[in-house]
């Protein structure tokens, strides 16, 4: 594989966008056969994706297996689902079934989806002609700015809150916290309540609360979240009784006001759509993890999972493994503060082992401000990652705008990421470069934009 734009600190990077393109070119030249992957999630909603693969028993079975495994992984974390239907190759279906079995290589994904959708996870095979039909649903989101609102953004390293009166932020604050280290949900409850009470005190009244949070949200309930991972692992009963309904319970205490809770990635996309006054927005927040969200051509959210942190972007099997999922080459290690930390040794930058991840990021960003070329190479590498990843994401989303947010995009480092991502699109994917604009909001919007967009979620009407 020869890349037109190389990652300065990662010579073994194998972007999935190029792998996908080269695989499809090879299949077309050889003569392929279609394969459909259908994923069913809550309420029978179903996403369908069809791709061409090599015919079985033609010497390409291993290529098919590895390619389809990454594709299914991508679809599962972009769309979501508890049932995978493989229509076409029975051999591929059996391989996917083994990978997603208990004890299989993708057992984490299996258990995660079963937990989120509260349904047994299964993989089934049908002939290609019997592939399930797509059944999608999209709903309007946010853009309500009347009245006195709280917007709260829960991140892994800090929490942000804004008091918003008729669309104007009259107060915003950002507080460092460590939710991932706490097994007692009271820590989270107290921090969230303190932030909201502070914001409420800056307004004459409180009409509604909007929340942007890491994790999967269904019906304002926190189904799972990295913020509450220690609670869920060490105190699962408390997670079920306290965490799932924490935000709605807090809203009741604060006057039983309307509340809407959304995944932080969707709020990122909403923030971009509001700022641009347009749709087809893919939002990507590079912070403690990678958050993704999408506003479709009609200005709606799709109900897709959009958990880009677990979407693979690097085909190299020797790539860094995510500690939580146990999988390699996934976005969380490429578009988060973890990416900066993992690249620091290759750049020759020593970091204090006792420092928190957020502190390590700040140390590298400080070097960036000082003009350190080692730090510049880190952000250039992330920019190359991002350009190739956008091209991969574009296979699964209809994108006109990419909005880049999060702590990693702050300062000059964010400008380097932006520039290199554009360079990749122009060099490798000129058609996409003409179609997609990458936006890097101003510093104020980057840091509090999500909490302000979150405030717009509830409809007072």
Image (cartoon, rainbow, N blue to C red):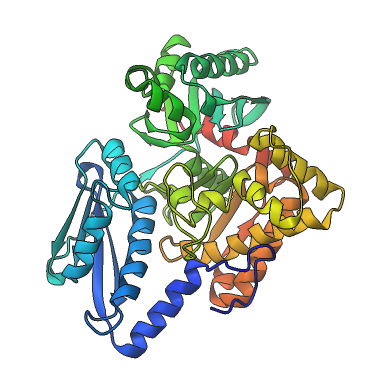
Q: Residue furthest right?
A: 370
Q: Residue at x 35, y 68 (%)?
A: 66
Residue 416 seen from this side: no
Q: Residue at x 26, y 63 (%)?
A: 37
Relative to 106, is 299 on the left or the right?
right
Q: Position of residue 13 (x, y in %)?
A: 57, 66
Q: Position of residue 335 (x, y in %)?
A: 58, 51
Q: Position of residue 9 (x, y in %)?
A: 68, 62
Q: Position of residue 249 (x, y in %)?
A: 40, 15
Residue 58: image quadrant is bottom left
Residue 100 seen from this side: yes
Q: Quadrant of the C terminus?
A: top left
Q: Is residue 450 above or below residue 33?
A: above
Between 352 and 66, the one lying in front of the other is 352
Q: Residue at x 65, y 66 (%)?
A: 7
Relative to 112, is 92 on the left or the right?
left
Between 290 and 326, the one lying in front of the other is 326
């Amino acid at each position: 594989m020869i890349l037109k734009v190389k990652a300065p600190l990662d010579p073994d990077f194998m972007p999935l966008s190029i792998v996908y393109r080269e695989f499809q070119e090879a299949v077309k030249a050889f003569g392929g056969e279609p394969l459909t992957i259908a994923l069913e999630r809550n309420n029978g909603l179903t996403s369908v994706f069809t791709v061409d693969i090599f015919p079985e028993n033609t010497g390409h079975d291993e290529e098919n297996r590895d390619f389809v495994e990454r594709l299914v992984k991508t679809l599962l974390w972009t769309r979501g689902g508890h049932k995978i239907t493989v229509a076409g190759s029975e051999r591929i279906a059996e391989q996917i079934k083994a990978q997603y079995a208990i004890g299989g290589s993708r057992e984490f994904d299996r258990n995660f989806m079963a937990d989120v959708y509260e349904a047994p996870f299964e993989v089934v095979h049908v002939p290609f002609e019997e592939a399930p039909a797509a059944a999608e649903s999209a709903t309007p989101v946010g853009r309500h700015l009347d009245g006195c609102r709280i917007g709260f953004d829960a991140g892994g390293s800090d929490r942000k809150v804004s008091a918003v009166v008729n669309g104007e932020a009259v107060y915003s604050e950002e507080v460092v916290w460590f939710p991932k280290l706490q097994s007692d949900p009271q820590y989270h409850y107290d921090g969230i309540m303190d932030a909201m009470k502070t914001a409420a005190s800056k307004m004459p009244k409180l009409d509604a609360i909007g929340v942007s949070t890491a994790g999967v949200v269904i019906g304002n309930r926190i189904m799972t979240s990295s913020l509450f991972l220690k609670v869920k692992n060490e105190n699962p009963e408390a997670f079920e009784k306290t965490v799932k309904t924490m935000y709605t319970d807090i809203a009741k205490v604060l006057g039983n006001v309307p509340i809407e809770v959304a995944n932080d990635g969707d709020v990122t996309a909403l923030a971009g759509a509001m700022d641009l006054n347009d749709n087809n927005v893919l939002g990507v927040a590079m912070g403690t993890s990678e958050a993704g969200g999408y506003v479709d051509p009609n200005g709606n959210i799709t109900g897709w999972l959009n958990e880009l942190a677990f979407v693979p972007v690097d085909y190299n099997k020797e790539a860094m493994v995510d500690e939580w999922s146990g999988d390699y080459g996934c976005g969380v290690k490429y578009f988060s503060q973890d990416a900066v930390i993992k690249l620091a040794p290759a750049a020759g930058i020593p970091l204090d082992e006792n420092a928190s991840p957020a502190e390590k990021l700040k140390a590298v960003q400080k070097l960036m401000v000082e003009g350190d070329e080692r730090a510049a190479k880190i952000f250039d590498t992330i920019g190359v990652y991002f350009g190739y990843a956008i091209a991969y994401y574009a296979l699964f989303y209809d994108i006109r705008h990419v909005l880049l947010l999060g702590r990693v995009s702050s300062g000059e480092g964010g400008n380097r990421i932006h520039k290199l991502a554009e360079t990749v699109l122009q060099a490798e994917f000129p058609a996409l470069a003409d179609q997609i604009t990458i936006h890097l909001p101003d510093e104020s919007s980057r840091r509090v934009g999500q909490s302000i967009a979150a405030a717009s979620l509830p409809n007072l009407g």
